[in-house]
Image (cartoon, rainbow, N blue to C red):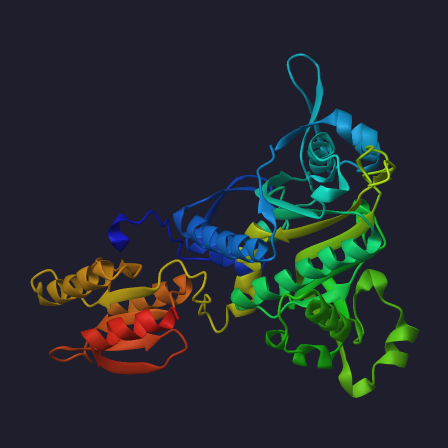
Amino acid sequence: MYLSKLFIPLLKENPSEAKIKSHQLMLRTGMIKQSSTGIYSWLPLGFKIMKKIEQIVREEQNKIGAQELLMPTIQSAEIWKESGRYDDYGEELLRIKDRQGKEMLYGPTNEELITEIFRASIKSYKSLPQLLYHIQWKFRDELRPRFGVMRCKEFFMKDAYSFDLNDEEAKKSYNKMFFAYLNTFKRLGLTAIPMAADTGPIGGDLSHEFIILADTGESKIYSDKRIFDIDISKHNDADDSIKELREKYDAFYAVTDNKFKKEDFEKKVKKENQLVTKGIEVGHIFYFGDKYSKPLKCSVDLQDGKKVDVKMGSYGIGVSRLVGAIIESKFTNNVMRWPESVAPFEVAIIPSLQKNDKSNYLKAKKIYNLLIKNKIDVLFDDTEDHLSAKFKKFDLIGIPYQIILGSKFTGDKFEFKEINGETETLFLDEIKKKLLNKRN
């Protein structure tokens, strides 16, 4: 992609309404544009990053055997009345009517709808367990939307649902999601700690929030520092291995503020290991048994002919929210450092260009064509901005690698810079190999 052709409406200054780094950066780099309060259009740069996050989430769901479907954004109010949540959910639920006067709602979550789909389709215990998920837009009418995509009204979310025969099997599904979430966040370059959390309007008696540390986080967290030393790479997707991993995490005190008890914290965690800070929720999982299956009459036939209400769990990841969360985690010293797995481009070509001298442009174009031929996603800055202005721009955009055609390159060697500041002078073939090897 040529930068001159990329739709990227850059802003020179931080917008006054943006109070945290992620909101500022997403507006400044043209990743999003506000449509109305708490609702944003996702522009090409931001959308590309979000879709990469979505794909990683999808791949990790598929690895544990979850099956993808797609449910609508608009739901019938009838099934919410069946479950008892239509009146209980509160004013965040956007209630609407169609032209026939039928009560509808813009889905904030999908427990009712997925249960209705399951009960109409699955009748026998032989079809269990089932793990179903979709990635879809949600809407919650937040009273005070703020912080850009971190707390907005419309958001892009992965939500999954498990259906099992009994509590024992249901806990295995819960643990699979627990494991999948840890691997998902690791691939996103994040250290997310599972913490015991309140179940809120979803319900149930078992819940974990996955929290990344950030000063701008809305959740206050209390944890044992040693929890960060757990190595998930030593575990595989076998039930026993995942159970052992869960037990390792559960052995350490780690809770959000709504579960915090001072006496428990001080009793279970030595003072030198106590961590009190803020964090950002990037995922939330729940086990709620028959909370929805019972009122919605979602049951299966057993071998002896009896019926039993299925046991259910719900598992959410805020895909659009993760874009902001990664920024809050990775943005330092006015430089954005996107993890390679979700960066908008793999490498940027930054030449010093002059109107009366086409030599640098022609060399840069040669590099561009070679990288494109090797299916390397590259952004070519073909503008005539001064080199120092280009550097500031790419510090904000945050592409992991830069090929610079400035004063330091000579002949067939080019300046190759990593976003962390390390610079080498390499031949073009060496640059190509280095970029291709980074994928492995």
In the picture, the quarter occupied by the C terminus is bottom left
Q: Is residue 115 left or right of residue 133?
A: right
- Res 30 seen here: no
Q: Is residue 301 above or below residue 360?
A: above
Q: Please provide percent x and percent y for residue 20.
A: 58, 60
Give the residue displayed 67% in from the left and 78% down from the top: 230
Nearest to the observer: residue 103 or residue 91? 103
| Left or right: where 362 falls relative to 270 | left
Q: Residue furthest front?
A: 304
| Left or right: where 213 falls relative to 421 | right
272 sits to left or right of 321: right
Q: 34 or 292: nearer the eye? A: 292
Q: Is residue 24 visible?
A: yes
Q: Is residue 69 above or below residue 278?
A: above
The answer to which image quadrant residue 112 occupies is top right
Give the x, y percent position of residue 52.
46, 55
Q: Nearer the viewer, residue 298 or 14?
A: 298
- Residue drawn at x 61%, y 33% is 73
